[in-house]
Image: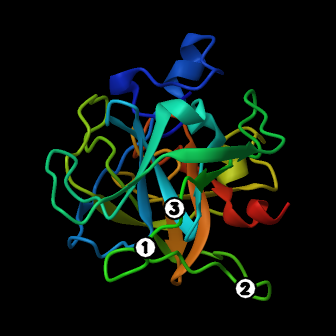
Amino acid sequence: MRNRRVASHYAFLSKDLTCDTQREILDSRIIGGQEVQRYSIKYQASLQTEKGEHYCGGTLVDKEWVASAAHCWRPSHLMIVVLSEHNLRETEGFEQIFGVSKIYVHNYNYKTFDNDIMLIKLDRPAVLNTYVQPVKLPGGNIPQLRGDTCTVSGWGVTQPYSYVLSPVLRAVDVKEISTCSWYYWGRITDNMICAGSPYGGKDSCQGDSGGPLICNGNFEGIVSWGISCANPYYPGVYTKSDTLEQ
């Protein structure tokens, strides 16, 4: 198993890695996608260590708040949030770098990955501009997914079984998989949705954890977990964004 999206290259895996099967589940990345136009995904966040090393993604939901996956948790003084990031290897001049004042994790089950969601309060409000804008949240009357084509983005690895993160932000289109619970032996809870390709080859993976799944322009999911990556029999599993309301 893999917690689909912690960058294992830096060994920042979630606490549920207690056996080889769990290690397999915990990996995440963008596979089968392409580099995005610079600053086109204005709500994308990079969670980084105190040394500036990317390890998870996130989504700006308000000028003071970023949503990510609970398995990306680190102590607040050891976490940096970067907005308007594109190339991790370059200082491009538009980055906004934040410390973390508070972290909220509610009812996360590290054994089942249920409620794999975390809210991060920035140490100051983000400056909203051409490069940084909060994501559009789904309205209460908008049905989720139903086979929609969605987009997932991040700096995760681009090849299965790789440990090398993408230096640039990438994205890939995936489809909601309604039969996901069958593939995962009934482990999919009401707080989870699945997306991928019926033919494989398109997925998030190591390093993409916590990043956004966008469907019809709305923030629908958070990269959470899965078995292997880009496997047609094991689509990516995402935490539903409406879990934020709980």
Q: Nearer the viewer, mark 1 or mark 2?
A: 1
Question: Along the polypeptide, which appears first: circle 1 or circle 2?
Answer: 1
Q: Is residue 133 left or right of residue 234?
A: left
Q: Nearer the viewer, mark 3 or mark 2?
A: 3
The amino acid marked with disc number 1 is Val
The amino acid marked with disc number 2 is Gly
Report the residue that reaches farthest toward the bottom: 141
The amino acid marked with disc number 3 is Thr
Q: Residue at x 21, y 73 (%)?
A: 37
Q: Residue at x 65, y 76 (%)?
A: 146
The CA span between labels 3 and 2 is 17 Å
**With respect to residue 1, does 72 lie above or below?**
below
Mark 3 element type: strand
Q: Mark 3 sits on what residue?
A: 59
10 Å neighbourhood of mark 1: few (<14), some, or many (≥20)? few
10 Å neighbourhood of mark 2: few (<14), some, or many (≥20)? few
Q: Do callouts 1 and 3 mark residues in contact (Cβ within 8 Å)?
A: no
Mark 1 element type: loop
Q: Nearer the viewer, residue 198 or 105?
A: 105
Q: Is residue 196 left or right of residue 31?
A: right
Camera sees residue 221: yes
Q: Is residue 121 left or right of residue 57?
A: right
Q: Mark 1 sits on what residue?
A: 127
From the top left corner, tell me how far across and down residue 76 is, in percent.
Answer: 58, 36
Q: Residue at x 31, y 49 (%)?
A: 155
Residue 139 disc label: 2
